[in-house]
Image: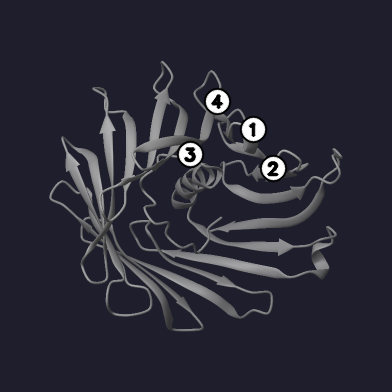
Amino acid sequence: MYEIKQNKVMEDCSMTIDAWELKSNFFKEKIKTSRLKAFQLMESETGDFDKDGVKVYSCEYDQAGNMVREAEYGPDGELDWICSYAYDAAGRLSEETIYTDGNVVEGRTVHGYNAESQLAEVSEFGDGSEAEYKTSYIYEGGRLAEEVRTDDAGEKSGCCKHKYDGAGKRLETVEYDVDGNPVTRIAYKYDAAGNLTEESIFACEDKTEELDSAIIYVYDDQKRLIERRIKNDEMVFDKVDYKYDAKNNIVEENFFERDDVDDEGYASRVVYEYDGSDNIIRETEYEMKDGSLKPMVYSRHIYEYHA
């Protein structure tokens, strides 16, 4: 469900709805509402989970329902990592700290807000007491207009600028290097209902640009995302489709990816099960073998909730 991951150079520049983001946002809200206590990750190459390793993930909440601690334990019962969360008086996330090997700080992120409660600054400290870099967020008319990155010396290392239409939909994002030269441009398209339908990503160099790839989004008549695919001029190299139940819970994700046109690709599937209160209780991953419709199970999550 969650993972420790490094921040991309300018991670907020794109609006991309990727598979992780959709699932993460969907289940984060469910977890906060239902107060997930723990889940077990069982991994197996044979489907015989009783004989293979079990990882346990647990989380704790404050009285306001905010998650204050995440932890993961390996199959041997040893603690792999802890992530703690702190909040300000307004209930806004103010600090995240990741620990490994007991109390060793692996990284710390501090969030600051402006008078309108908009995110104004994010500082990444790594494992030291000095910020390794900061990202400042600048708003115009209530919309995020620019993100400015500074390094550990306080020098500007890059930025992203955003443009919007009259309805507030983002039309364009341009990433610039330290010298102010455009590096990447992303153009956005929407359907009549306002859903994001396409992102065209251009690589910029020497005042010219070339289309690198495009991300296509497809929705059903209930405005639910049912397909996302990434393509270039030659092929679709990454695709995921989603299926929902009558209560709009995600019940299945089908993934496909390949590296080049000669690659047969890799397919996998994730299936979700819920209880009567719409809490996710089981997540099972499958790998599709040799084009067979019969998948091979290789991992499973079991969820437990606070009373």
Judging by the rendered image, the residue that carries numbered circle 1 is 234
N-term-proximal mark, 3 vs 1: 3
| Neighbour tally class for label 4: few under 14, some 14-19, many 20 plus, Cα within 10 Å | some
What's the mark number on residue 17? Answer: 3
Judging by the rendered image, the residue that carries numbered circle 4 is 218
Nearer the viewer's eye, disc 4 or disc 2?
Answer: 2
Q: Position of residue 72 (x, y in %)?
A: 56, 70
Is disc 1 in contact with disc 2, using a CB cutoff of under 8 Å?
A: yes
Q: Position of residue 180 (x, y in %)?
A: 25, 49
N-term-proximal mark, 1 vs 4: 4
Q: Position of residue 209 (x, y in %)?
A: 41, 36
Left or right: 127 with respect to 78? left
Identity, as a three-letter code, of the amino acid under mark 1: Glu
Position of 234 relative to 38 (above/below): above
| Neighbour tally class for label 1: few under 14, some 14-19, many 20 plus, Cα within 10 Å | few
Left or right: 64 with respect to 284? left
The CA span between labels 3 and 2 is: 23 Å
Residue nearest the observer in this picture, 188 or 102: 188
Q: Position of residue 223 (x, y in %)?
A: 49, 23
Secondary structure at badge 4 equals: strand
The CA span between labels 1 and 4 is: 20 Å
Identity, as a three-letter code, of the amino acid under mark 4: Val
N-term-proximal mark, 1 vs 2: 1
Residue 149 can be seen, yes or no: yes
N-term-proximal mark, 4 vs 2: 4
Quadrant of the rendering where the N terminus is positioned: bottom right
| Neighbour tally class for label 2: few under 14, some 14-19, many 20 plus, Cα within 10 Å | few
